Image: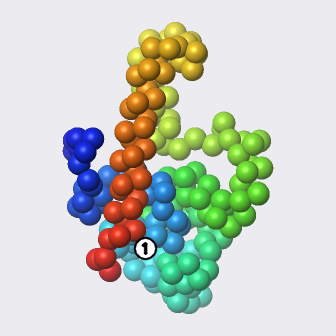
Amino acid sequence: MSMSNDTVPTALSFRLRDHRFTALPVKNILRIRMKDLGVKNVDLQKALDYPMPNVISMLKSGGMKLPPGKAVIAAKLLEVDPVFLLSKVIAESDQALWDAISAVMGEYLITTNELDLLKLVRDGLDGHDVNLTESPEFADAAIPALKVILARQNALAQAALDRNDD
């Protein structure tokens, strides 16, 4: 799907994008992915090994936080990158802990999308080890593209929050 820079994403275009969850809180990611995939509260409740399905309602409303120990299970069921969801869960429950983890392990915590970007760079450089951060040509091309992508992601996240199809 191609979008011009001035196109405002609709709820439909939002649904079609794989990476639309970045700016959303965990409760919204759970609610939206469950709806999109047809996952019922009882399905997630059983997967997460909770005794009662009302716990899932509390997770989706924000009345309870998803425990970090259950984030990977939820990510797999909801088809969300586990590193991405776990990082959001930890950051929401304990920002200082997430800051410490990021400071020590940040360069090793790589999502599937980031791995795809790394592969693209490696393929494009045909085996050459180039410090792209020191290349003015790369920065001149990448920074404007990143700004456009960031604006689009922010608009998609806002469209998700504004979406009223529950």
Q: Nearer the viewer, residue 90 or 155?
A: 155
> Could you tell me how many numbered marks the image carries?
1
Residue 162, image x and y in percent? Answer: 35, 70
| Image-based side of 70 in relation to 113, left or right | right
Q: Residue at x 32, y 52 (%)?
A: 17
Q: Nearer the viewer, residue 118 or 23?
A: 23
Q: Quadrant of the C terminus?
A: bottom left
Q: Quadrant of the N terminus?
A: top left
Q: Nearer the viewer, residue 20 or 82?
A: 20
Position above or below: 115 against 154: above
Position above or below: 107 against 164: above
Q: Residue at x 49, y 57 (%)?
A: 23
Residue 18, image x and y in percent? Answer: 36, 51
Q: In the rendered image, which quarter is residue 95 located in?
A: bottom right
Residue 79, image x and y in percent? Answer: 43, 59
Q: Which residue is mark 1?
A: 31
Residue neighbourhood size for the residue with mark 1, other residues' Cα within 10 Å, grouped as few (<14), some (14–19), many (≥20): many
- Under circle 1, the secondary element is helix
Q: Residue at x 41, y 17 (%)?
A: 124
Would residue 123 be seen by someone viewing this image from the given angle? no
| Image-based side of 75 in relation to 163, left or right | right
Q: Amino acid at mark 1?
A: Arg
Q: Residue at x 65, y 70 (%)?
A: 67
